[in-house]
Image (cartoon, rainbow, N blue to C red):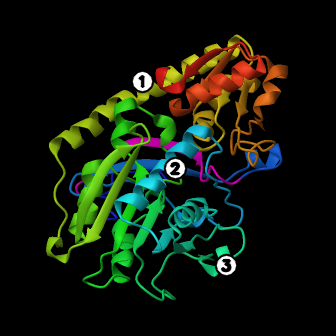
Amino acid sequence: MKYSNESVNCPNCRNDSCHNFYSLYEQPVSENILYTNQTDSLQAQCGDIELFLCEHCGLVFNWAFESHKLDYGAEYKYTLPPSTYFEAFINELAKDLIETYNLKHKHIVEIGCGKGDFLNLLCKLGNNSGVGYDTSYEGPLETNNGKINFVREHFSPKGMKHIPDMICCRQVIEHITNPGNLISTVKSVLGKDALTTLFFETPDFAWILKNMVLWDIYYEHCSYFTEESLIGLFTTNGFKILRNEKIFNDQYLRIDARLDLSLYKKTYPKISANTVQTVNNFKVQAKKRLTNIRSKSKDFSTKGSWVIWGGAAKGVTFCNLVKHEVGDKLHVVDINPIRQGKFVPVSGYPIISPDKLVYIKPHTILIMNGNYQKEIEMTLKNLGIMANVICVDDL
């Protein structure tokens, strides 16, 4: 669905001061549907990306997004990365939330809990009870002697027995076409004097813009935020910001908030001219960036076998950005067992485990997320793999 110059309204604030700044077509609609055979992966459903900036509230959204193409059911296989770096990050995050907000013997709700890993951790460390909502959840609906329950549905006030002490929502709001509706739903479960703390985490679009991370733009994410627009979303809906910061080496935004209806506004604050300028700069530079990574990927293939390390969202997107340039010389590695032996949607590249590299003997290994570079280099050293290791950010 390609944009053809008609007027576009922001799905969040309904303002019509929106402009298109990045387009990408025939991209896989999901990076987390795993394909067991190559034929099916090559025929995976595609969708288009037409990114718009709302120059009023600051939301960046995919105008071409069609929600019916996505299925967050049992086939959707997102799990936390089995990485020592990521595990340390998640553990420190959970400990910080518990200590900062005294989450001990309290009740926690998680929106989009995935397989329940983060909710289980919060409940374990603070001896808390909890309820997790996720249509893709797999596992028992009741754990920890009934203290933790899971609901295979989207979050709603229906069935909630009491107001939680915390509502957390990691890496979910970017999947919501109208983020304001989600915040309104959350607000509806709280009394006007509720002391419930909200914790939300989402990719930082300012980091994507600044570093030209084209492979961090994908179909599943229909809404993107900068720090400015995320704060505006919460304050306009009547929440006081307790804490906002960049985390995970600046890749994510964290916002902690609490209801304060005195802050409620009928209209969103207008974003700064600097944000508009940054987006306009990205529009100019993105084509050059894409041409560069395709050219370098083609050069890698002319020299023999090479590897992308990371078969999750970033890797899937990168493969589909360069698939016409690289041929069969590209291989994809992932440490997550659920991805190994599967195939990248649309581009069809097989995903292998690190130990298979001894047979491939790649000349170059391109790391999709620089946060993991040290542990990847240690793994390669232990395997005796001698290759040129490059972070994709440095291409």
Give the quarter of the image for residue 280: top left
Residue pictured at 63% horizontal, 34% vertical: 319
- Using the rendered view, name the quadrant where residue 235 is placed: bottom left
Which of 112/346 is in front? Answer: 112
Q: Give the number of the mark in front: 1 or 3.
A: 3
Residue 31 inside the magenta-drawn segment:
yes
Magenta span contains residue 358? no
Q: Earlier in the sequence, mark 3 or mark 2?
A: 2
Q: Which residues are magenta?
A: 16-33
Q: How many marks?
A: 3
Q: In terms of secondary structure, what is the magenta stretch mainly?
A: strand
Residue linked to disc 1 = 288
Instruction: Please state which of the two labelled residues, at mark 3 or mark 2, is closer to the viewer.
Output: 3
Q: Residues within 10 Å of mark 1 (few under 14, many from 20)?
A: few
Determine the residue positioned at 16% across, 46% down: 272
Q: Earlier in the sequence, mark 1 or mark 3?
A: 3
Nearest the eye: 178 or 9: 178
What mark, if any, has residue 145 been given in the picture?
3
Kind of element beneath mark 3: helix
Q: Position of residue 215 (x, y in %)?
A: 51, 37
Whole-number angstrom distance, CA of label 1 to CA of label 2:
35 Å
Of 365 and 9, which appears nearest the observer?
365
Tell me which label, 1 or 2, sits earlier in the chain: 2
Crowd class of label 2 (few under 14; some 14 to 19; many from 20; radius 10 Å): some
Please say if 88 is above or below 121.
above
Decide: marks 3, 2 in contact (CB < 8 A)?
Answer: no
**Residue 334 in view in this figure:** yes
To which quarter of the image does residue 101 belong? Answer: bottom left
- Residue 376 in picture, x, y percent from top left: 64, 27
Query: Which residue is the site of mark 2?
Result: 90
Dot 2 amino acid type: Ile
Percent coordinates x, y for residue 205 in the rendering: 37, 44
